[in-house]
Image (cartoon, rainbow, N blue to C red):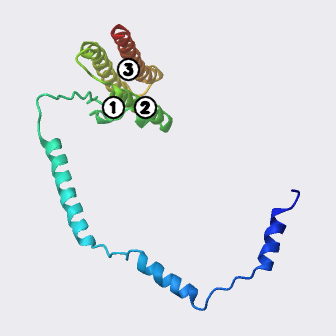
């Protein structure tokens, strides 16, 4: 029982030498070719036409959905139409120095980002409208401060007030976002 199987098979192979008939391999390959199906050449012309038709139908359907006006679905987009770069003043906070421009751009970008993230629905529309009114007041105050900056010239108080106004607007939007999350979670808890 303690024999090694490898040795046993080697011994048996050496004792028996099987020889194949002449031409055995070619006969085998010929039979194999006869038994296996031949590969067909696929005509891609029909597939190309079908793909083109499918593409045209898909684009037509997408275009129809995009350009059709359905009264059932209304989308409300909140935009901040009064940005600091569109004011009709001689110069703004960003024009005073590169550092102040960075600060102004930072706050304006974050304010716009927060505005774009707001989701308006019938349930939270009143809350958002009240915050938007306050934001409009801050925008008007920012314009007044910008006019003061142009009339009186740059001074530390006006610059500080402009930066504080930008901070207040961003904080207001962050509070709105927290309030909306609270309303959403309380509504989810009431459903459960």
* Residue 104 drawn at (x, y percent): 43, 31
User: Considering the numbered disc 2 on the image, is that residue within a helix, a strand or a loop?
Assistant: helix
Which one is nearer the viewer's eye here, 161 or 31?
31
Instruction: Identify the residue under disc 3.
Output: 173
Which is more foreground, mark 3 or mark 2? 3
Determine the CA span between mark 3 and mark 2.
Answer: 16 Å
- Please give the name of the residue rendered at 33% of the width and 75% of the height, measured from the top-left corner: 40
Q: Is residue 36 above or below residue 104?
A: below
Q: Are marks 1 and 3 in contact (CB under 8 Å)?
A: no
Q: Image quarter for residue 137?
A: top left
The Cα atoms of the two marked residues, 1 and 3, are separated by 17 Å
| C-alpha span from label 2 to label 1 | 9 Å
At 86% from the left and 56% from the top, the residue drawn is 1
51 or 102: nearer the eye?
Answer: 51
Residue at numbered disc 2: 104
Say what secondary structure mark 3 lies in.
Answer: helix
Left-right relation of 42 to 160: left
Q: Are marks 2 and 1 in contact (CB under 8 Å)?
A: yes
């Amino acid at each position: 029982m303690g024999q090694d199987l490898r040795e046993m098979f080697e011994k048996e192979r050496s004792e028996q030498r099987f020889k194949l008939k002449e031409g055995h391999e070619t006969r085998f390959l010929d039979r194999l070719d006869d038994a296996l199906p031949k590969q067909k050449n696929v005509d891609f012309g029909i597939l190309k036409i079908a793909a083109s038709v499918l593409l045209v139908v898909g684009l037509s359907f997408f275009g129809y959905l995009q350009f059709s006006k359905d009264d059932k679905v209304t989308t409300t987009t909140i935009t901040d139409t009064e940005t600091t770069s569109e004011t009709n003043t001689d110069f703004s906070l960003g024009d005073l120095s590169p550092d102040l421009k960075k600060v102004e751009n930072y706050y304006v970008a974050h304010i716009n980002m927060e505005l774009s993230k707001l989701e308006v629905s019938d349930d939270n529309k009143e809350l958002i409208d009240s915050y938007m009114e306050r934001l409009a007041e801050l925008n008007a105050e920012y314009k007044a401060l910008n006019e003061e900056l142009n009339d009186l010239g740059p001074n530390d108080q006006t610059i500080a007030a402009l930066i504080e106004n930008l901070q207040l607007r961003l904080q207001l939007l962050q509070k709105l976002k927290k309030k909306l999350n609270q309303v959403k979670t309380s509504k989810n808890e009431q459903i459960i």
